[in-house]
Amino acid sequence: MSDFVHSFWSHYIAWITLAGILACVVLLWLTSRKKLAGSADNTTGHVWDEDLREMNNPLPLWWVGMFVITIVFALFYLILYPGLGSSEGSLSWTSEKQYQQEVDQANADVAPLYARFDAMAAEQVALDPKARHIGEHLFLNNCAQCHASDARGTKGFPNLTDGDWLYGGSPEQIRTSITQGRQGHMPPMAAAVGAPDDVKNLAHHVLSLSGSPHDSLRAALGKGKFGACAACHGADAKGNQALGAPNLTDKVWLHGWGEEAIVAMVTQGKLNQMPAQEGRLTPSQIHVLSAYVWGLSQPATQKP
Amino acid sequence: MLNPIRKVIPIQAVDELGTSLYAATPKIYPRSVQGRFAHWRWVLVWLTQLVFYGLPWLEWGQRQAVLFDLGARRFYVFGLVLYPQDLIYLTALLVISALSLFLFTAVAGRLWCGYACPQTVYSEIFMWIERKIEGDRSARMRLDAGEFNLERLVKKWCKHILWLVLAMWTGFTFVGYFTPIKFLGLEFLQTRMTSWEVFWVFFYGFATYGNAGFMREQVCKYMCPYARFQSAMFDADTLIVTYDVKRGEPRGRHTKMAVELRSTGDCIDCSLCVQVCPTGIDIRQGLQYECIGCGACADVCDTVMDKVGSSRGLVRYATQNAIQKGWGSAQIWRRVLRWRVGIYTGVLLALVIGLGVSLALRSPFRVDIVRDRTTLSRITEYGTLQNVYRLQIMNATEHSSDYQVSVRGLYGIELRDKDPIHVEAAQARWVVVHVDVPYGSGETGSHKIWFDIDDPHNGTKVVEASVFLIPR
């Protein structure tokens, strides 16, 4: 434990703790030797509210036994568990280790449940009602925070049901996306494109690629500037799944649609991240989850 | 050896000490007692224990009638299926129990302690076993004081084995409220009970064995909080076990003389009231905190009074006022009607009625609605605005149901997912639903909407509010 800047504090706490326990022992010993002068009516002589007297009844001996047990317990506890300053205790117990043990135990408990799916291809898993049920729960607990409960995403977070994939839609590619995460990087390209007006023209060209409403004059002027984009998005603007560069010819606009959004994207760029789930989920869970996510855009699995 | 019993009346032993701060507690050997109050105690022993030991074996349809399934977080009480969300009913039950204790205590003192408390009930059963094996008070004292021989060994072993069997059965029954008891029995027979089940059986078994076999009155005197704070509910009109000082004193052996000529009171100082007392006190010293109000002294004194030809009730249930002012039972009864009792009764009645009505009107299912927080709102391909919600439907009945969901609160509002939601019996299910409104059906901002969830199975309906966000 590195909570203390100096080992003095560890000793300070340890000695106060031990002195406190010792004080309890001494207190018990002293009181057990003490004899009170007995009064005739067995009271301490204190009287409250006219007639309320404090009886001088001795504590039962078993109570002393309990007191001794607590002291012994405290000593054993301090030997076994962290408590004396920065001592780790002979069991070297930590809450983190216990948590990990419980997670491992839980994973081991559900392993037989997943064993059947491990042996199946993702396409089959996606058709299995039980696997889909598990997948749905995994999705709601781990993915829905960004991709929404219905997996249709929102601005900046891809829709997983539309068949349009930044990094590929095969179960294998989805598994990679989940396991390792993804880093989407659109660099600021304004300098390469030219003047602000050139960027605007380029934006109209990009809009024209998907047949979206655009200024055809500006689009024609911007067409020549697309060379700067082609390195990633391809000369045909169909994107590149190896880089995560989106297809610009469809109607999917992850980061917003229209001239303004495209100009902003070209000028400022964008860094988008899907966090890696490796370590958070077991490979078996990721297998079921990627099959479930793959199934979301497969018409065959969406019929109950 | 003229009268060995009188030498060890415990209360005197305690009195003579007082010089040390700690003292070994003398073992109490309560003498067995018969009479009205002992009879009632046995009635309550049977009643409470038949319920406790028997209830887990009752069946209700396909399941155990009373089962608290902590793992699945479902609590079955006969026809009721309760969720953790129904905690309020447990709270109400506990408040009602507490208020009943207040009421009983205000009227008749430690009625609970003396007759129905598990500590008393199990002590009574354990003492019965002890008596059957070792004999009554004097025989037990002789056995303990005598030499260590085979007879003593056999008797002690028999007693402890019987105690342990009963204690373990108690622990087993208790765990049977949380794990289906028949399954638990099967597990036991096949020696494959889980470690936690074994732990709790032993824990409760050991607690029963220790408390009813050894700790007994020590629990009431030093551990029980209720025993301490109930003095706050006592007043001068509360029924307590009392010794009629005016009638009894001066105590002493009766001579063969006419009652009118006797110099002594009705108390013949036979000390039986001390011998039967489970807490080892002398009731003739007046109300003491150790007295659990069991009435054993009143029972035994009545039999003595019958023998010597005096009227019963030298030790009896009476109030402080009644003893001081010489009231009869009619006056005691009249004083039951006092403010304290009235208020306890009123609050208790209100709560019981409230709980009853609430249970009767309880919806057979519950709904929780959580709006998706990431997707504030989105435009769909149909040109509508869409919000996404998660619905949790908790079925609190014993049959599966198909719930019909509809939504209202905004112009043109529509639920996209129209299929009924199937939820299995006693299960909860999360489903994702989409709600659409036509573009421009409301101003920018948050709008309150309502989900109506119908259970066609029994015609009940739950209305849950949520909000719909319309973006700028």
Image: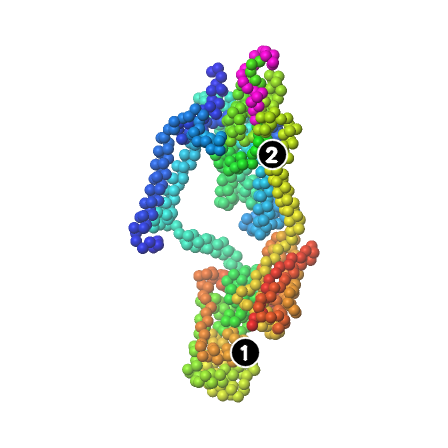
Chain on which label 1 sits: A
Which residue is identified by label 2? B107
Foreground pick, B136 / B60: B136
Whether residue B269 is visible to the viewer of this picture, yes or no, is: yes
Foreground pick, B472 / B330: B330
Is residue B224 placed above or below B249 in the rendered structure?
Answer: below
Where residue B294 sits in the image (x, y, percent)? Answer: 57, 29
Where residue B409 sits in the image (x, y, percent)? Answer: 64, 65
Which label sits on residue A250? 1
Q: Which residues are magenta?
A: B242-261
Q: Is residue A193 magenta?
A: no
Could you tell whether B451 is left or right of A111 in the image? right
Q: Residue at x 62, y 43 (%)?
A: B347
Chain on which label 2 sits: B
SS category of the residue bearing label 2 = helix
Which label sits on residue A137? none
- The answer to which quarter of the image holds residue B112 is top right
Q: Residue at x 60, y 70 (%)?
A: B443
Foreground pick, B169 / B139: B139
Is residue A238 placed above or below A84 in the rendered structure?
Answer: below
Whether residue B135 is visible to the viewer of this picture, yes or no, is: no
How many labels were placed on the picture?
2
Where residue B442 sits in the image (x, y, percent)? Answer: 62, 70
